[in-house]
Structures are given as structure tokens and as C-alpha cells.
């Protein structure tokens, strides 16, 4: 008897994680002879533990197709990490019990490094408990920090958003600089690695164009050098555009966002690193500034998603199902770059054991000698990832995003499972 | 002998102020028999005072056409207000001297309320000094606060950006709410009027959809009611999306952004009103939050400009030249709405004396009884303004924005004018 599949979204969502869901669901629908229903976890893996399944077979083909151009996580995501098999054995056993009850033989887990680790462990415990589950981890993260894959679906779109926003805001501040704002600061995501900050470098075609300064988590912040650079930039160009990663830090490892100002109650200031950098500029040089914090806007900006990213997000979902049906398990589809120019890529796979819990950092060679900009090799890597536009449909000026029915599956197990 | 024209950009720039420049310049090129060269002020009106003119006749037709899809102020803007004729007589006289030296008989001033006032005064002083200048104010402001015109070019695009960003970020936080962020706050522009904040209301089709709470400058902030509303929203929907205007204020008129937290040096916190609101939510209700500050991104986001806005921005530029050549002076082209549905508009004109220094506030009837959302009449007003997309051309994933030559005009006056 053919088995059903379970799909779950995990961690911070992206502009294209639903394109991956679309790839999974459309492919499974085409392979009806080999795979049964695909259930989606309501709020990710939590939906598996509490037996809150969504029956995706109740969604129309049109609704599923619309997932391709819809940001956010359509089924709900979760920041919920299953730890080691020993510490969390009851939860792993529960997962297998739920899968067994619903005849789920395929587990598609769409997330970052932690999720790859979970998918790997579920595969092990299933074997152990005599209910083997084909486990496929599907890469997703704006942080671009998964190993082995050339890039992570989700990253290309945030990269494009940040590069375009930087170019646009730079034109704005350039217009204002004579009598008003001289320094503009954009805060972007990336707590551990500077991939997103690096992408802002695509806004300019040379080092004299904005952004003039990028602050990476990888390069310890040097206040004196920074202020010299800002002043030189304003004196030369009339203005200065700075992009700062939320993970920018001092040489002792502490975040810029934490060190320094505190509110009246003694709490660390909540305004983020952009306001810290703005304060340094104002106090050190007296320049008028503006700053923006992109936050969720950057990772949900489906309206300006990268076409390459959307295609890759869809492809890893599609391939996940195809690999599973070919008998592969405990693997993650990966994107392999076969050529920079013209840009060519294909999808292969890597064992989950090799991708779980490993972070891919930016190579030092991607950051300029002075630590404030990107190098040609970084540009060569990044440029193809933001190519092409993939506009959603619009109605009366607003993008039309998928609305799902989300029909729940009737639970089969009696006991209510309590989350730790 | 036919006279030349002078065009200047003023105040905060917008995603479409260059579309207006495009309308002025393309129309003047078509009317070569009636009007000479159009000079643009380098950094707005300052370029007139210091005789820093850009000769737009040196730009290619292609470059001028590209202005239509380029954000920022292509010739540089200025926050520089000429006050009354008495206080600033020397500056007004200088303006006329520079215009006379370059045979400038047409002054096109593209800005907000202050600029309309200046254009009006220049018209008066020109007559007085025996060098009459045809003065046309061209409306521009993201704040949408100019009177008599149905809307201000620049507003429709920021409205569209804010509405789309709110819809997208709402999908993101909805996915995360089960285990992580429950409250998302977006800070938008609008120091005096809540037009931009109101536009976020277009993100949802009903009052149960995000944004769940809008904080307007027009409605005194009531902390207790606000927290009750946030809690009810999280309990009902699982999450809460809040859009706050930078001008949100307490009942005593002080800004939310000022009151409250101070940094370690006793300075008012610089993080903006979003972090103030976030802190209130965290302290009052304990919910995990995220916040974004759109800042310049919202008014430079040409990549998602409103087609209606672009067309209106171009039309007021075109009409400015046509009205001037028909002998009108001391007027501002205004947008007149002739029908809501289907949306129809035309360009007429109003005397500068009636638009100068007057702010159009949001009618109270546009804000719901409880002060937290927009009404149907507000929606009926706003909806047409964000209609249609007008995408810029792209190359290798990035928008191609105009690059001008900006050839300076040789000064004709010897004495160097010193700005006050």
C-alpha cells in the first residue's frame, strides 16, 4: 500500500519557502500512483507532535499553484528544536507513533541546520522502532549558512531586496545631502554570518558607489577606523551609505547592538544596531543621519523576489519528492553551481549527516582588505542569485497571495501529547 | 525672444519626483518653439542662489525618459526655506538677478507647502523688480498634505509600498506566532498627518486582517486601551500587526518617540517610535516582538511604485509647462478626482496663494470610532491611488536607474552669493 507524506516548515520563514511547498505538493500530485496524501504540519513539527495535520489534498490546484508566489509560511512554522535522541526520546517516539497512525512513510522537513539534524534523527529512530520513514531535509534559510549547497533558497530574494533597497535609498540620501541627511544606515539580518549584508554590495558597481561601508559580523568593529572612513566618504561624495549586519560585533565578541546605550530602566537599548551606529556617527562627527531597519520586510518581500531563488526553491521541493520516491533517504537536495557565467545550476543531494548542525561562514576572501566592502569573488558568487524578477499577480494595486482552506485531519491517537 | 525655464526640486524626495521632472523636460522639448532651455537647480533652490545651474539640454532623450522610473531627486533637492520678502529680500533679489542673467522667464518649483509659498513670493518680487517670472508650483510630497489637490504625487507610491510591506510582514509573523514573535510593529513616516499610516490599512480586506492596529498622529495615544487591544488581538488571532506613524503622540502633544526611555547619556532614545511601542508591548504584556523602520526605503521604493502615482507625477510636470506657456502664473497644477469607481482624474490648477503654507489633515471620518483603523470612506479614497504597477527595467537582477551627465552652466554673475 502506498504511503502518505508529511511536510513541515521550520524556523524563520522566507519569501520563497512556500514555493518549495508548492514544488513538494505539485510533484506529489503528479506522482499519485506512488505516494498518497501529503499532510502538512500546522505550525511545523509541532503539528506532528500534537497530531494537528492539514490535509493538503483538500486544496485546489489553483491554491497550491499560488503558493509559489506567496511569502510567509503557509502552514505555520515553528522555532522548536528536538534535541538528542536520549533527551527527547519521548518526542521522537511520539513522532513515529503519529506517522504510523497516519501511514506516513515520507517526512519532508523544510528548514535550516537544526531541522536537517531533526530529519536525520527521525530517520534513525524510525528504523529503530520498526517503522522506517524516508526522511528528506529541504534547505531553507535567508542566512545562506547551510553547507554543501551553493546557496540556500530564501537567500537570493532577501539579497535582491537588500541590494535594491540600498540602491534606492542611496539615491534618496544623495539628493538630500547638501542641506540635510548626510549619513544613511540600513540594518539587515544575519546574526552570525554577513551574507545578507554582503548582498547590499551589489547596489553599487564600483567602490565609489553606495554602499560605502558594510559592517560584517566577521570583522571586529573598529570605531576609530569606522569614523575616519565615514568622514572621508562624506567629504568625498557628500554623503555616506552604511549597511550594518545585526550581528556586527566588537573584538570581544559582544554585539554592537548590546554594548553602549541603555534605557532609563537600565535595559540594553532595543533600537537595534542601526541606532547604535547612528549615535556613534552623530557623536563622533556631528552628521545628520537617517536609519532604516528592514527586519521582517526583507525576508517577506515576495513582491521583489529573485526569479532564480524562486526557481531554486521550487526545484528543491520537487526534487525532494523525486529523490524520496527513488528510494533515497536521510538526504538534502543541494544546489550545485556548474558555471558562473552563464550561470548554470542543477540539483543533487547530500547526506543529512554531513549538513546537520554545520554553519557555512563567509570566506574572508569575500570581504575587502579593509573589512568594509565586498570583493570581486564575492560579487561573482552573489550576482547570479538575484537575477530575474518573478512578480506575483496583482489586483487593485495589491499582490494576490494564496489563501488556503487548511482542512484539519481527524486525529487518530487518543492521548493528548503535551509539549515540553 | 523666447525665454528659458528653471526647474528645482525641494524638500524630501519621493519615488516619483523625477517622473515629474521627466514630464517638465519632455514637454518643454516638444515646445521648443515657445520655450528655450530648461536649467535645473543643482540642489534645488540653492542652485539658483549660487548660480549652480545644470543644463538639461545636454542630456539625451533616453536619459530624460529614464527619469520617469528613477527614485530620489536627480538634480539634488534642498531643505531650504525662503522666508518672508522682508526678512529674505536679498535672497529674492538674488534669485531675480540670476534669472535675469540667464533669461529665465519660467520658474517650476517642485515641492510641498513651503515651496508653493516661495514660488508665490518669487512671482511677486519679479513683478516688483521689473522682471516678471511665470511661477508654477508643482506638487510633491509623500505626506499628502497639500490642499485643493485630491492627492500629492509621491504619496500613492509610498502608500502602495506600506500596504504591500504590511501584508507581506503580516504573513511572516502569522507563520511565526505559535512559538516565536507575536507582535510585529512597522514604523512609517508622517510627522503631522496619518495619511501614510492609513494606507497600511489597505493590507487587509476586513478589520480582522492585519494591520490590526494603526496608531495615527491625529488620535492621542492611550496606553491602556492600546494594550487591551493588543492582547485581545493576540488572543483572537494568535498575533498582532501594528503600524505606527512617526508622529504618534500623547494627549499633551508630545511624541511617543520622545517620551519615556533615554540612553545612558540622558539623551532621548534614537530608536524611533517603533522601539518605544515595542517596549510598551514587552513590558505590559510580555509578548515577543519584532519591529521594522521603513524610513527612506518607503519613499524611494521605485521598484514597487504605484502606476497611478507615476502617471499623476508625470502629468503635473507636463501640465506645469503647458499652463505656463498658456500664460498662467502663480498657480499649482492640482489633481481633480472626477469619479471613485471607475477611478477617473484630470489635472486643473489652483492659485498658489490658496495652497501655500496650508496643511491638509486627515478627516476624522477616515479613522474608525476606536481610533485604531481606517473607515470605508478612507479606503474608498485611498484604493485608487495605489493601483497598477510600473516596474523599472532591470539588468542582471538590479533596476536600471537614470544616470545624468549634469553639465554645469557657466555662471554669468561675478559676485559670489553667500547663503545665510
Image (cartoon, coloured by chain):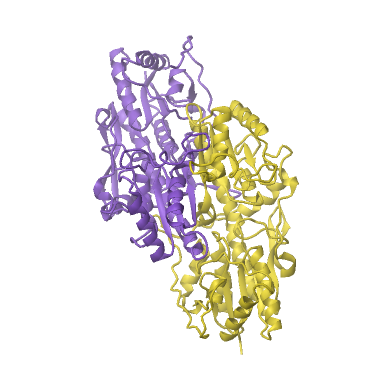
Chain colours: A purple, B yellow
Quarter the C terminus of chain A occupies: top left
Q: Is residue B174 above or below residue A131?
A: below
Q: What residue occupies the far front of the structure in this picture?
A: B265
Residue A262 x, y percent position in the rendering: 47, 38
Q: What residue occupies the far bottom of the structure in this picture?
A: B1
User: Seen in the image, is B173 located left or right of residue A216?
Assistant: right
User: Seen in the image, is A155 located left or right of residue A43?
Assistant: left
Residue B382 x, y percent position in the rendering: 66, 50
Q: What residue occupies the far top of the structure in this picture?
A: A414
Q: Quadrant of residue B167?
A: top right
Q: Residue at x 51, y 17 (%)?
A: A410
Q: Is residue A291 above or below residue A18?
A: below
Residue B61 x, y percent position in the rendering: 48, 74
- Return the residue nearer the eye: A411 or B299: B299
Quarter the N terminus of chain A occupies: top left
Q: Using the rendered image of the protein, determine whether residue B239 is visible from the camera's viewpoint.
A: no
User: Seen in the image, is A356 located left or right of residue A272?
Assistant: left
Q: Residue at x 55, y 74 (%)?
A: B25
Residue B37 x, y percent position in the rendering: 55, 81
Task: Tell me how many marks there are.
Answer: 0
Q: Residue at x 27, y 50 (%)?
A: A366
Q: Using the rendered image of the protein, determine whether residue B217 is visible from the camera's viewpoint.
A: yes
Q: Is residue B323 above or below residue B164?
A: below
Q: Residue at x 43, y 34 (%)?
A: A12
User: Seen in the image, is A232 located left or right of residue B286?
Assistant: left
Amino acid at each position: 500500500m502506498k504511503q502518505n507524506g508529511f511536510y513541515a516548515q521550520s524556523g524563520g520563514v522566507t519569501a520563497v519557502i512556500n514555493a518549495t511547498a508548492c514544488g513538494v505538493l505539485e510533484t506529489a500530485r503528479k506522482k499519485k500512483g506512488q505516494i498518497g496524501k501529503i499532510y502538512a504540519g500546522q505550525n511545523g513539527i509541532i503539528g506532528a507532535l500534537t497530531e494537528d495535520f492539514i490535509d493538503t489534498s483538500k486544496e485546489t490546484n489553483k491554491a497550491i499553484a499560488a503558493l509559489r508566489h506567496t511569502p510567509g509560511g503557509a502552514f505555520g512554522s515553528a522555532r522548536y528544536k528536538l534535541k538528542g535522541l536520549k533527551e527527547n526520546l519521548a518526542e521522537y517516539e511520539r513522532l513515529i507513533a503519529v506517522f504510523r497512525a497516519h501511514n506516513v512513510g515520507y517526512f519532508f522537513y523544510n528548514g535550516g541546520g537544526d531541522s536537517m539534524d531533526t530529519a536525520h534523527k527521525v530517520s534513525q529512530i524510525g528504523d529503530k522502532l520498526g517503522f522506517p520513514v524516508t526522511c528528506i531535509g529541504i534547505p531553507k534559510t535567508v542566512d545562506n549558512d547551510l553547507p554543501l549547497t551553493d546557496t540556500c533558497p530564501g537567500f537570493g530574494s532577501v539579497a535582491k531586496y537588500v541590494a535594491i533597497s540600498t540602491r534606492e535609498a542611496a539615491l534618496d540620501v544623495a539628493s538630500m545631502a547638501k542641506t540635510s541627511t548626510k549619513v544613511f544606515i540600513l540594518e539587515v539580518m544575519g546574526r552570525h554570518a554577513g551574507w545578507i549584508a554582503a548582498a547590499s554590495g551589489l547596489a553599487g558597481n564600483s567602490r565609489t558607489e553606495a554602499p560605502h561601508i558594510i559592517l560584517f559580523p566577521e570583522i571586529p568593529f573598529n570605531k576609530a577606523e569606522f569614523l575616519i572612513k565615514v568622514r572621508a566618504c562624506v567629504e568625498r561624495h557628500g554623503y555616506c551609505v552604511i549597511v550594518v549586519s545585526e550581528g556586527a560585533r566588537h573584538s570581544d565578541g559582544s554585539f554592537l547592538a548590546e554594548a553602549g546605550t541603555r534605557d532609563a530602566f537600565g535595559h540594553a537599548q532595543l533600537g537595534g544596531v542601526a541606532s547604535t551606529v547612528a549615535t556613534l556617527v552623530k557623536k563622533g562627527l556631528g552628521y545628520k543621519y537617517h536609519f532604516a531597519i528592514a527586519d521582517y520586510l526583507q525576508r517577506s518581500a515576495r513582491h521583489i523576489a529573485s526569479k532564480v531563488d524562486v526557481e531554486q526553491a521550487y526545484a528543491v521541493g520537487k526534487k525532494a519528492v523525486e529523490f524520496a520516491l527513488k528510494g533515497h533517504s536521510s538526504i538534502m537536495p543541494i544546489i550545485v553551481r556548474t558555471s558562473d557565467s552563464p550561470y548554470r545550476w542543477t540539483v543533487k543531494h547530500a547526506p543529512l549527516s554531513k549538513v546537520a548542525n554545520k554553519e557555512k561562514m563567509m570566506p574572508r576572501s569575500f570581504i575587502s582588505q579593509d573589512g568594509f566592502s565586498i570583493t570581486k569573488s564575492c560579487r561573482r558568487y552573489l550576482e547570479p542569485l538575484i537575477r530575474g524578477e518573478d512578480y506575483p499577480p496583482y489586483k487593485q494595486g495589491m499582490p494576490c497571495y494564496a489563501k488556503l482552506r487548511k482542512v484539519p485531519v481527524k486525529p487518530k491517537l487518543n492521548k493528548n501529547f503535551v509539549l515540553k
